Image (tube, rainbow, N blue to C red):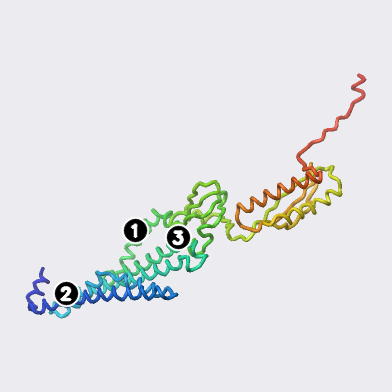
Amino acid sequence: MRHLKIIYFSNSWEHLLAAGLVILALFLILYTTKQFVSARLYKKASTTPTHWDDILAETIKSTSVITIFVFSLLCGVYILDLPDEVNTVNAHLAAVVFLFQCGLWISKATSSWLAYKASPEFGKETRHQVMNMHIVGFATKLVIWTIALLLILSNLGINITALIASLGIGGIAVALAVQNILGDLFASLSIAIDKPFEVGDAIVIDDLNGTVKYVGLKTTRLTSISGEELIISNADLLKSRIHNFKKMQERRMVFSIGVTFDTPPEKLHRINQIIQDIFTNIPTARLDRVHFNNIGQSSLNYEIAYYVKSADYSVAMSAQQEVNLSLIEHFAHEKIEFAFPTRTLYLVRDENALTGQ
């Protein structure tokens, strides 16, 4: 109240009224200008292919009403005769509001740019990175507002070095208490930057497999082939070996078949040609190789390797089914028998036992 009395008694009513009119007029002018400029920029941005004018419009629109009011207030009281201590407070207030507004502008510009990067118009690859952009945006805003807060505290006369040092022990205790959460947060940031997988990718993690549906700050969620949702912490995820099948252009399939020992040699030679003919009639697959691999305990074994011309799991299963059915049909037509584990027993007739000798 002492400052109010000083302002009242040290300035005439004319000065006080003039200051009030300056505050009101300047606030209305600045607020109207902000609205007009942002509206014009939005209109102009809708007709241009670049996105930078959209970011500029969003940034200007984010100008706080509090900032405009404080700036108008400080300009209004500048014409008054005020004590030095009040002017010092006003200077600190101006610096704090300016830093706060800079934080808003930078944060909004960053958010707008990341939103554009995650939009479908930016590119096909980025459409699957919306959650990654949110993670990067969260980390960026955290850094921006941390720096802004430190600058504000420094401007208010607080010793930042001493403050950080005093918070060091407490920070260590807090970090130990929430180390798992912090580990997941940093892991999510690593996923966003390194991109070992994206939303929509089919991946295998140890003995778990599924399609990535969501990448969050703490967990990643998969939908398994059987339909259930798998929730894995980001820290555990990065510690595991990840197989990303979405990056494949083709799937390589290898399997073996065995035929019986009594298969004639000419039919053994025919098997290679039969398998080659099978793959000429399957448009989704191409043969890599077929070899008479080894002679087993109960079968003559062939190893067959082929590629499915798609990374899609369902396409691969359909191709595998077509290959198996074609093998059965062709072998039946050629009268070639598949082998199965058998054991032959030879009985020796003991003549002495039969005669009783």
- The residue under label 2 is which amino acid type? Val
Tell me the SS state at disc 1.
Answer: helix
Q: Residues within 10 Å of mark 1 (few under 14, many from 20)?
A: few
Q: Earlier in the sequence, mark 1 or mark 3?
A: 3
Q: Residue at x 48, y 51 (%)?
A: 232
Where residue 122 appears, x then y in whole percent? Answer: 48, 69
Question: Pointer 1: what residue?
Answer: 170
- Quadrant containing the C terminus is top right
Measuring from the top left, give residue 241's x and y in whole percent. 57, 55
Which residue is nearer to you in this view: 270 or 223?
Answer: 270
Q: CA distance from mark 3 to mark 2?
A: 48 Å
Q: Counting residues from the N terminus, which is met first, the one under dot 1 or under dot 2?
A: 2
Q: Residue at x 64, y 53 (%)?
A: 316
Quadrant containing the N terminus in the rendered view: bottom left
Residue nearer the viewer, 124 or 48: 48
User: Could you tell me if the residues under marks 1 and 3 are in contact, i.e. CB atoms within 8 Å?
Assistant: no
Lower sequence index among marks 3 and 2: 2
Q: Is residue 335 left or right of residue 82?
A: right
How far across and down, in percent of the image, does residue 108 sit? 36, 69
* Mark identifier at residue 131: 3
Determine whether 310 is above or below 62 in the image: above
Residue 276 pos. (x, y %): 76, 55
Circle 3 crowding by C-alpha within 10 Å: few under 14, some 14–19, many from 20: many
- Relative to the observer, which residue lies in front, 81 or 112? 112
Using the rendered view, name the quadrant where residue 297 is placed: top right
Give the label on residue 86, or none.
2
